[in-house]
Image: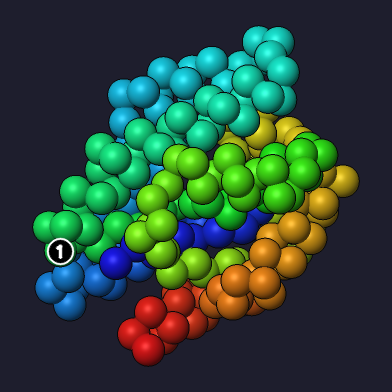
């Protein structure tokens, strides 16, 4: 099984991924957490470039992220699922779609581009943490270090949130109130995953 935890930066995805992994493994289900820009050598190399202020076009950024996602699927996600390991994605396809649509790419174009990188059999369960944008930004700013992505600003994150909401409705995702406590969110996720 592949579970994608989605939502804007600062909403609590990483925390919920860790809690879900611990919960799954306490029940005997082997699992891993993956991130586009951290789980492969290629992803880490691209992250080194993308988290700086090095000038680049949004098109270069889009294809770089797409490259990371396709590589992550081929190298880690697909082999893990074949071996019965559940994969928890700290961000997934929706992060790509919402981020680049908020940067003014056409939604249909993005779907077509994404379809070239992933086989049709890639069918994750998507959990969207829908919460307060201002609170998410406050959490981002409390981090000891910030990347370009943490500093996108309220207007951008609000746009991205609207894209997430539309995608959640169109694709029948699991939507969890991201304004709840960490424990309440975790309980909601585990309840949904066990259905």
Mark 1 Cα-neighbour bin, 10 Å: few <14, some 14–19, many ≥20 = few
The image quadrant that residue 83 belongs to is bottom left
> Could you tell me which residue is drawn at 28 percent across and 72 percent down?
23
Residue 68, horizontal then vertical, whole percent: 43, 32
Residue 146, horizontal then vertical, whole percent: 63, 30
> Could you tell me which residue is drawn at 71 percent across and 50 percent down?
108
Q: In the picture, which quadrant includes the N terminus? A: bottom left
151 is higher (above) or lower (below) than 186: above
In the image, 143 versus 186, the foreground residue is 186
Q: Is residue 147 visible?
A: no
Residue 8, horizontal then vertical, whole percent: 65, 53
> Could you tell me which residue is drawn at 76 percent across and 39 percent down?
105
The image quadrant that residue 27 belongs to is bottom left
Q: Residue furthest top?
A: 54
106 is higher (above) or lower (below) than 87: above
Which residue bears the numbered disc 1?
A: 84
In the image, 135 versus 57, the foreground residue is 57
Secondary structure beneath label 1: loop
> Could you tell me which residue is drawn at 62 percent across and 30 percent down?
62
Number of numbered tags placed on the structure image: 1
The image quadrant that residue 191 belongs to is bottom left
């Amino acid at each position: 099984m592949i579970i994608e935890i989605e939502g804007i930066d600062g909403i609590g995805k990483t925390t919920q991924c860790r809690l879900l992994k611990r919960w799954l493994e306490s029940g005997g289900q082997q699992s891993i957490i993956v991130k586009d820009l951290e789980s492969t050598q290629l992803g880490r190399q691209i992250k080194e470039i993308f988290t700086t202020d090095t000038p680049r076009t949004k098109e270069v950024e889009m294809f770089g992220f797409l490259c990371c996602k396709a590589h992550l699927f081929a190298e880690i996600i697909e082999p893990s699922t074949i071996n019965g390991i559940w994969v928890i994605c700290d961000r997934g396809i929706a992060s790509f779609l919402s981020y680049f649509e908020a940067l003014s790419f056409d939604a249909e174009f993005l779907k077509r581009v994404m379809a070239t990188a992933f086989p049709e059999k890639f069918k994750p369960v998507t959990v969207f943490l829908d919460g307060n944008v201002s609170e998410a930004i406050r959490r981002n700013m409390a981090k000891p270090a910030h990347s370009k992505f943490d500093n996108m600003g309220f207007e951008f994150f609000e746009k991205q949130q609207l894209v997430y909401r539309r995608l959640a409705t169109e694709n029948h995702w699991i939507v969890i109130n991201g304004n709840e406590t960490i424990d309440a969110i975790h309980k909601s996720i585990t309840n949904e995953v066990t259905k």
